[in-house]
Amino acid sequence: MRSMYAIYRKEIGHYFVSPVAYIVVALFIFLTAYFFTLYLTDAILQAYQAPPDFDAPSWILRLFLGLIALVVLFFIPMVTMGLFAEERKRGTIELLMTSPIREVDIVLGKFFASLTMFIAMLLPTAIFLAVVWFHSDPVPPFRMILAGYLGVLLFGGCLLALGLFLSSLTENQIVAAALTFGAFLILWALDFGSRGSGPTAQVVSYLSVINHFEDFTRGIIDTSGLIYYVSFIVFFLFLAVRSLDSMRWRRA
Amino acid sequence: MIEVQDLTKTYGQVTAVDHVSFSVNEGEILGFLGPNGAGKTTTMRILTGYMPATSGTARVAGFDVFQDSMQVRSHIGYLPEAPPVYPDMTVASYLDFVLRIKNVPSDKRRARIDDALEKTKISDKRNELIKRLSRGYKQRVGLAQALVHDPLVIILDEPTVGLDPKQIIEVRNLIKALAGTHTIILSTHILPEVSMTCDRVVIINKGKIVAVDTPQNLTTQLKGGQKIHIDTQAPENPLKDLLKGIPGANRVELSPARSDGHITATIETASGRDIRSQIASGIVQKGWPLYELRGMNMSLEDIFLELTTDDAAHATPSN
């Protein structure tokens, strides 16, 4: 636990001492703010033309959460690519692996640090939602916002865990980022394969990262989605631990 | 303190370390000497718990490096070939991080950092970012990292690489000062380093141990034997027969005659015999001119080359 915190502390320092965190957060805010403004004006225009027979605030909220998920897809590889690749490249992995600290503590410390970084990216978007919250009538149900953010967090957590694992496979950060991005796209694309009704389509649909996410944006905390995300995260963190362990055996 | 038994490490077809056995006593400095790729780093990595051996056992401070890896790792300080530093940390925060992952309680950390900075003479760089330090200072930060938690055993992989001559001397003195309270293994391919710092030397080549002894013994063992270099003008075969006929001449190597008729030879003698006068009178009696006759003590380099090169490569005498 203490060594896990040591790793966590070091990674947080790494994110926020280097300009990486600030660039990532700034770009993320810029992009999400841009799209949020587009959606908002769109909703307002629609409301003027025809009396809103639809729940505009909830509509904006759902669109916006979906957008965050999409933008996150592009940003997470930047957050996770260095986690292990950089340690391997610098040789600092030798310090970690010869210290009395378990692989699982290294992996968890790094995972929670990247999750903290992700939360730091998300926090400013709460300002946009506050705008919707204070100026809409009727206000969207608060549990919808909470469920939506929980969804974003779980969805992002999956991508972080996957990116963390892929980063442990190489000492090249660019390769790690490319692998992570490619793997995300494939998981996303599973959604298209899930159109249909056969048993295969149902399995594929369950496996798609984005499908479960949509429930959360509707304000539904679905147990099956929760289990899916948590087991996804645990699975890839486990793989990362195994990958670190196997590094000892195959290192030449 | 360290017991290594039949340690073997293979990577696929390649055997990097081949049935290596040695032991290091408490407070001793053991030098690990060998050409690049001899298996020094691999052996050290096994000892530090970085990677497992294919077969054989190694015990550090009574703990098996594979079975009780965590105990071994908390008793070891390790400086790999490249100092494992994080460029965007300051020296002090880096050492603090190292102490944290070595499970040193927080009330002791401050004093340990001060001590390590003092020993490696980098107290003035305490709050400097590591990326702004020169190669020599980075190496010293790496060294500070290896001793900051006051481990029983310190393992240093080529600790003086990349340092300037003054820094090399400082690091050697530091290593000598650490012995006694710490048990140290250091690897190097620089020979004077071994004779200056180590109590005992393990010479390793192609994964096998070729000699274990004190530097003094290794030198005197072959110093008794001398090398004699001569330069004369003589027909090749009669000269060879003459030299070989002198009692005490162990090995005779002739270089091919040059166009002006000069021929040089190197004669290795058995220990304790000086045959220079016999060589001189023998050549003069034959009526050959003798241009040069010079005795050369075998240095640690010669021993090293003797032990680590094949006979084919040995044909060119070293001087």
Image (cartoon, coloured by chain):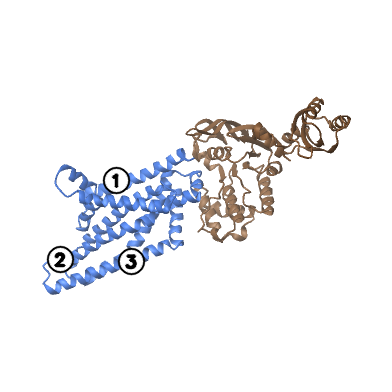
Chain colours: A blue, B brown
Residue B221 image position (x, y, % from top left): 74, 32
Q: Is residue B120 visible?
A: yes
Toward which corner of the image does residue B20 lie, by quadrant? top right
Numbered circle sitting on residue B278: none
Q: Earlier in the sequence, mark 2 or mark 1?
A: 2
Q: Which residue position is annotated with label 1? A: A231
Residue B125 image position (x, y, % from top left): 60, 60
Q: Earlier in the sequence, mark 3 or mark 1?
A: 3
Q: Which residue position is annotated with label 3? A: A29
Q: Earlier in the sequence, mark 3 or mark 2?
A: 3
Q: Residues within 10 Å of mark 3 (few under 14, many from 20)?
A: some
C-alpha span from label 3 to label 2:
26 Å
Residue type, label 3: Ile
Whether labels 3 and 2 belong to a single chain: the reply is yes
Q: Is residue A118 left or right of residue A137?
A: right
- Does B120 sit above or below residue B188? below
Q: Secondary structure at mark 2?
A: loop
Q: In the rendered picture of this protein, how many numbered marks are placed on residues?
A: 3
Question: Which chain letter matches label 1?
Answer: A
Q: Residues within 10 Å of mark 2 (few under 14, many from 20)?
A: few
Q: Residue furthest bottom?
A: A48
Q: Is residue A136 visible?
A: no
Residue type, label 1: Ser
At 45% from the left and 58% from the top, the residue drawn is: A14
- Does A209 sit above or below residue B303? below
Q: Is residue B74 left or right of residue A228?
A: right
Residue B180 image position (x, y, % from top left): 67, 42
At 38% from the left and 57% from the top, the residue drawn is: A78
C-alpha span from label 3 to label 1:
29 Å
Mark in the foreground, 3 or 1: 3
